[in-house]
Every structure is written in structure tokens, then in C-alpha cells.
Image (cartoon, helix red, strand yellow):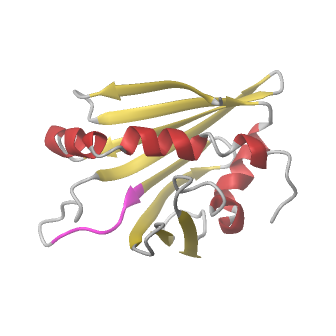
Amino acid sequence: MPVTDVRKDFDALTMTITAEFEADAERLWELWADPRQLERWWSPPSHSSTFVEHELTPGARTTYFMTGPDGEKHHGRWLVEEVERPHRLHMTDDVVDDEGKPEDGGPTGMTVTIAEADGTATMSIETHFADRVSMEQTIEIGFEQGMTEMVNQVDPLLGAAKA
């Protein structure tokens, strides 16, 4: 299994998933940059993802939805803030209520870091939360398991040709 570590830091309001892959940083980056490839792993195995808008440039927005087995759609939207191809990506959740808080009370953004050494790439996805209650509630409903399942779907895609 690619996931090697999951760390929850309730003081920093972050959860970080780290995984190792037999790939280079550029190949992992392609799985983020190409929306058709991202659709193949950015959802738990029981769901499918559709990316409507996706461009990894600062200021761009990514709009997507996950469809569950019951047909229910769960929408998401990111604001791309920082891009350092192929090593770093920072996005914030872009759907907020009238007070500027995340509408769903869950994650507020994420930072993806990809490092490479000796033919192995390590990818860390650090998810940021607005407050401790939101973090605890999000983890309680299965966020850690869902993220782990998503990242574990990357390995089989690394050798596959671009979709």
C-alpha cells in the first residue's frame, strides 16, 4: 500500500497523508495536473469524480463533483494559490458562507508536496481545517479512511498511459 503515514495535528488543525510511489515527481504531478487522470483517483472507490474546470495556475479555480453509488453528487471547488511544478501545490476550498467560513464546515484547503529520491517519489497531502470542531467532525465521518483509499488508488495509475 502506498500510504505510509497519517498524522493528525489538532493544534495546527491539519491532517497529513504521506505515500511513497515507484515513480518520479513529474509522473505524480501529471496525476494532479491532468483532470482526466485526477478523475481516476480523486474519490473513494465507491464514488466517481468529474472535474468540470481544472487548471493548475495561481488564481485558477477547480470545480468538480463526486457521484456516490446512490447517484448523490457532492460538489467541491478549489482556488489554486501556489504552483511549483512538480513539487508543490496549494489550494484553498473556495465555497464559503456569508461569514467567510467553509460552507460544509470541513477542510479549508490543502498543500500537496512531492519529493523525489532514487526513483521513489513521496507525496504528502496536508489538509487544513478551520477549527478543531470541524476537524474532529470531518475525521469522525470517515475523512481519513476516504483520503487513504483515494491515495491508494494512485499506484496502479502510475504505469498507465495518459487517459
Vertical side of 132 occupied by 99: above or below: below
Residue 70: quadrant of the picture: bottom left
Residue 79 visible from this viewpoint: yes
Q: Residue furthest left?
A: 99
- Residue 42 placement (x, y as % from top left): 56, 56
Front one among 96 and 48: 48
Residue 139: quadrant of the picture: top left
Vertical side of 36 occupied by 133: above or below: above
Q: Does the magenta segment cover residue 93?
A: yes
User: Left or right: 160 with respect to 53?
Assistant: right
Residue 53 visible from this viewpoint: no
Q: Residue furthest bottom?
A: 52
User: Left or right: 111 with respect to 29?
Assistant: left
Q: Which residues are magenta?
A: 92-97
- Residue 50 placement (x, y as % from top left): 57, 72
At 72% from the left edge and 45% from the top edge, which residue is drawn? Answer: 28
- Residue 154 placement (x, y as % from top left): 68, 45
